[in-house]
Amino acid sequence: MSSKKKSSSLPLSLYDSKVAYLPLPDCKHGWLYEIMSRNLTLGVFRKDRKGFVGIREKLGHVYLFVEYHWDTGEPFGTVKPLRRVERCPIKELDEFFRTEDGKLKDNEKLFDWLKRKQHGAIQQDNKKATAIMLPKRKMKPRMTRLLLRTSARINTP
C-alpha cells in the first residue's frame, strides 16, 4: 500500500493523497475489492477496462456501472481499491449483453452476486457499529433496553 491511513473517525476523502490504496498493477482480474470511489463501495476488477464493475444507484435506478482505477489518471480515474475481498465466481463481467435481436440485456448474475455481497457488507458494518454503540459498563436494565431499541432502529438496512 502506498501510505498509512489517517487515524480519525471521519472518512477520508477520495481526493486525499493520504489514502492508502492498491496500485493498478496489484489489482487482479475477476476479484472483488472494497473500494473508495464516487459512486461504488464494492467492485469487481476488469483488467481490460482498468476499472471496477459495481452497483450504482442514481435517481432511483440501480444498475451495474464501471468506474476506473485512480492510476489511469484524470478525468476518469475515480477508484482507489482499499483491499481485495474474494474471487468473483461470475466469469462474464460486462455490465450488459446484446441479445440476438439487438436489444441490451443486463448482466443479472453479476448484479445479483454483487447485491448479496453489498448486503453482507452492510450487515457486517451494522454489527461493528452496534458493538461500538453499546457501553461496556453495567447499566440499568431500562437504559440497556433503550440503547438496544435505538441501535436496532438505526442499523436496519
Image (cartoon, helix red, strand yellow):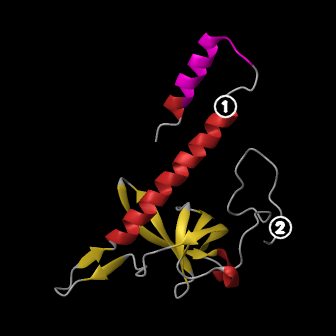
Q: Is residue 136 above or below residue 129?
A: above
Where is residue 77? Give x, y as percent: 61, 75
Residue marked by disc 2: 3
Q: Residue at x 41, y 57 (%)?
A: 58
The spot of residue 136 in percent (x, y) is 75, 26
Q: Residue 144 appears at what percent x and percent y?
A: 62, 18
Whether residue 145 appears in magenta in the rendering, the answer is yes
Can residue 76 be seen by looking at this rendering? no
| 40 sits to left or right of 14 | left
Q: Earlier in the sequence, mark 1 or mark 2?
A: 2
Label 1 packing within 10 angstroms: few (<14), some (14-19), many (20+): few
Is 59 displayed left or right of 44 in the figure?
left
Residue occupied by mark 1? 133
Q: Quadrant of residue 110?
A: bottom left
Query: In percent of the image, x 66 and y 69: which residue is there?
Result: 80
Work out whether residue 118 or residue 55 is closer to the camera in this orientation and state it: 118
User: Is residue 139 something that shows in the picture?
Assistant: yes
**Magenta-colored stretch includes residue 148:** yes
Tag 1: residue type? Met
Residue at the farthest left position: 101
Q: Nearer the viewer, residue 115 or 13?
A: 115
- The stretch of residues the image draws in magenta is 138-151
Secondary structure under tag 1 reads helix
Q: Residue at x 49, y 56 (%)?
A: 118
Q: Residue at x 21, y 80 (%)?
A: 103
Q: Nearer the viewer, residue 55 or 120?
A: 120
Q: Residues within 10 Å of mark 2 (few under 14, many from 20)?
A: few
